Image (tube, helix red, strand yellow):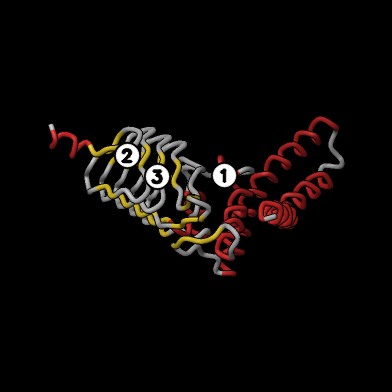
């Protein structure tokens, strides 16, 4: 019976998020559609080929307008409702778990439609700040796999490499666990590495490409970690 209730809850939540997605996408499409309609009207006296060119250009511009508008709408919605994740351990069927799923779904709207075009630009920092992350100056994001932004703190001049996963949640023994990830200044997060919940990384540390930093790992300042699971190069040398 419990599994049936869980399945029903998932179906209801999924349909609800489809509706929310339609509202957000619909609102974000309005400026771009207005541009497309305006261009189509203004170019009415042109021959077919030039008119199609300008129509195609306006559609492309409309897509970028849609993406940036979606980022602002989702961010303002989250900020306006003050939707933030709280550290703790929660049942999968609970208000905090629902809030986590809802906030995650808002981010996935952008993740699946537009985020590739804002990586390594100031718009990526704007996105994660609007989603609740605490970021220093000149943080560089080259990965769209940065989840649970309101549980994330990153210092100045840190680089998040391509495909790196930073995540503030996990599910263990039927419980949702939420914990902050804290990354210092001038840190290098290598490409395709994984940073699990509860990790704290000191200033000027390096996490090597494809390394897996297990939950609650503490990385000292200026240390270098590699491997699966990741290990400290400093400690390894001391043991030799």
Left-right relation of 29 to 212: right
Query: Is residue 26 something one can see in this rendering?
Result: no
Q: Vertically, is 144 above or below 103?
A: above
- At x 67%, y 51%, the residue is 3
- Between tags 1 and 2, which lies in front? 2
Q: What residue would you read off at disc 3?
A: 195
Q: Position of residue 233 (x, y in %)?
A: 22, 36
Q: Quadrant of residue 117?
A: top right
Q: Marks 1 and 3: in contact by CB < 8 Å?
A: no
- Whole-Å distance between the Cαs marked 1 and 2? 24 Å
Q: What residue would you read off at disc 1?
A: 115
Q: Quadrant of the N terminus?
A: bottom right
Left-right relation of 162 to 57: left
How many marks overall? 3
Between 94 and 194, the residue placed more toward the observer is 94
Q: What residue would you read off at disc 2?
A: 207
Between 123 and 238, the residue placed more toward the observer is 238
- Between tags 2 and 3, which lies in front? 3
Q: Position of residue 121 (x, y in %)?
A: 48, 45
- Whole-Å distance between the Cαs marked 3 and 1? 20 Å
Between 199 and 72, the residue placed more toward the observer is 199
Between 12 and 4, the residue placed more toward the observer is 4
Which comes before the other along the chain, label 3 or label 1?
1
Q: Position of residue 138 (x, y in %)?
A: 38, 50
Which comes before the other along the chain, label 1 or label 2?
1
Q: Marks 3 and 2: in contact by CB < 8 Å?
A: yes
Crowding around mark 3 (Cα neighbors within 10 Å: few <14, some 14 to 19, many 20+) is many
Crowding around mark 1 (Cα neighbors within 10 Å: few <14, some 14 to 19, many 20+) is many
Q: Position of residue 17 (x, y in %)?
A: 70, 55
- Between tags 3 and 1, which lies in front? 3
């Amino acid at each position: 019976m419990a599994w049936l209730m869980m399945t029903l809850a998932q179906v209801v939540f999924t349909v609800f998020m489809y509706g929310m997605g339609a509202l957000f996408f619909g609102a974000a499409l309005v400026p771009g559609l207005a541009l497309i309609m305006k261009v189509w009207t203004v170019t009415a006296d042109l021959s077919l080929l030039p008119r199609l060119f300008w129509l195609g250009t306006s559609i492309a511009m409309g897509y970028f307008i849609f993406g940036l508008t979606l980022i602002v709408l989702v961010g303002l919605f989250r900020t306006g409702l003050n939707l933030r994740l709280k550290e703790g351990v929660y049942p999968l069927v609970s208000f905090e778990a629902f809030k986590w799923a809802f906030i995650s779904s808002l981010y996935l709207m952008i993740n699946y439609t537009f985020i590739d075009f804002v990586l390594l630009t100031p718009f990526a920092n704007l996105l994660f700040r609007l989603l609740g992350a605490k970021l220093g100056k000149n943080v560089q994001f080259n990965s769209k796999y940065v989840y649970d932004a309101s549980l994330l703190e990153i210092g100045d001049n840190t680089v998040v490499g391509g495909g790196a996963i930073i995540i503030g949640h996990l599910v263990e023994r039927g419980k949702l666990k939420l914990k902050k990830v804290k990354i210092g200044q001038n840190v290098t997060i290598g490409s395709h590495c994984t940073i699990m919940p509860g990790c704290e990384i000191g200033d000027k540390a390096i996490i090597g490409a494809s390394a897996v930093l297990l939950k609650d790992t503490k990385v000292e300042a200026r240390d270098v970690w590699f491997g699966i699971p990741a290990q400290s190069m400093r400690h390894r040398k001391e043991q030799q």
